[in-house]
Amino acid sequence: MVQSSIATGPRRAHTGVFTCLSLLLLLGAIPAAQAQLTPSVDIECSPVEISVEVAPGTPATGTTTCTLTNDYFLPEEVNITVDVVDLVYAAPETVTVSANSDTTFQVVYRAELGDPVKNIQSDINALVESAGGLPCLSCTEETFRVTVAIQQYGRPGLLIDPQELLLDPGQSGEIVFKVQNRGNDKDTITLDVVNRSGLEQFGVQFSFSGSSFELNADATADVTLTVTTTKDVGDGIFEVEITATSQHSVDEGNAWTINDVFRLETAAKQELILSVAGVPTWAVSVAAILLLLAVVGAIVVVVKLVSNRRSLAADDFDFDDDDLDFDDDDFDDLDLDDLDLDDF
């Protein structure tokens, strides 16, 4: 709490001074236009409602300009005090106002970044301390009330842990995350996927458990994003970007959006090399029978070839006993009798 006031001591009566002034007035020494017996001051400030922006990156200050008017025939020293709570302020302590003139000064209020939305009343007080160097013991304080309005700002938040999905054709997967209102008042946060239409044309469909969430300041909500692939999806690897937008910021003409991503990989359906799409059923059946007959015929040929090869091999090793019948005369021709074993 910040409150400023000026303490004053006991005031003494200066009746003699003001009696003299009254006599001068009666005698015509003081013009009628200046016929003010006691010093006083009027105060007015503008704007009456002071807007203060407290979004991150802003100065969080607001200013009002006050005018002091002195209708007295002597210059006045005016003491300034400001009464306010929950704010810091800066203002002059004393302002000098010339006779029959006016003077301006400023009061600057400062809030804290992120302060909640609220209106704060503040009194700006002006009291004549002296006129022409003489203390004013009978002067009363003048007050002007202003309102300091803390403005709303919108900031969305996304809390997504690193996640990835690998989906085949016709499969579904889920991404779970949180959405947050990081502004200073109730706001609606809307969700979307970047390049959603392009990904859907590719064969990937998205469905949020909720596309918008009304949240109080600093509140969060759980969100599930269901990702489904069509049967015709192709092969691809993507970084899918989720966005969160503050509706208040959009309404104010300064849209504030943040994003986060997750990894998605899709696999296309494996196609057969021989396709029978569009071929009549009877033609497929005939082709299958012919293919079976061809396989059977090939097996028969292979079996026959193997059988023939084995038959040829048996003929090559079929010797008669006559072929191995050697006469003694055949060995005599070798002169084995003349062989002397002692030579070895």
Image (tube, grey):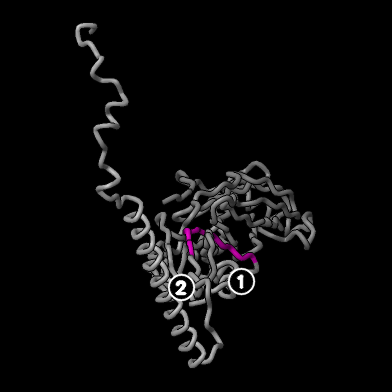
Of the two numbered discs 2 and 1 in the rendering, the one whose residue sits closer to the viewer: 2
Q: Which residues are magenta?
A: 254-266
Q: Which of the 4 image quadrants contains residue 208?
A: bottom left
Amino acid at pointer 1: Gly
Q: Picture coordinates of residue 253 (x, y %)?
A: 65, 68
Please give the label number shown on residue 161: none
Q: Quadrant of the C terminus?
A: top left
Q: Considering depth in this image, is 126 or 121 the residue closer to the camera?
A: 121
Q: Residue furthest top?
A: 343
Bin the neighbour count of mark 1 within 10 Å (Cα to Cα): few under 14, some 14-19, many 20 and up.
few
- Tell whether 272 sits left or right of 172: right
Q: Is residue 99 visible?
A: yes
Bin the neighbour count of mark 2 within 10 Å (Cα to Cα): few under 14, some 14-19, many 20 and up.
many
Q: Residue furthest left?
A: 342
Please give the label number shown on residue 169: 2
For the point 45% across and 70% down, the residue is 186
Q: Considering depth in this image, is 250 or 52 the residue closer to the camera?
A: 250
* Dot 2: element: loop
Rounded to the nearest whole Å, what is the CA distance between mark 2 and mark 1?
17 Å
For the point 60% across and 68% down, the residue is 195
- In the rendered structure, does residue 262 fall within the stretch colored magenta? yes
For residue 163, above or below residue 76: below
* Dot 1: element: helix
- In the rendered structure, does residue 270 fall within the stretch colored magenta? no
- Tell whether 176 sits left or right of 239: left
Q: Earlier in the sequence, mark 2 or mark 1?
A: 2
For residue 50, above or below residue 82: below
Q: Is residue 190 visible?
A: no
Specify the principal SS of the magenta part: strand
Q: How many marks?
A: 2
Q: Provide the residue designation for mark 1.
A: 198
Amino acid at pointer 2: Pro
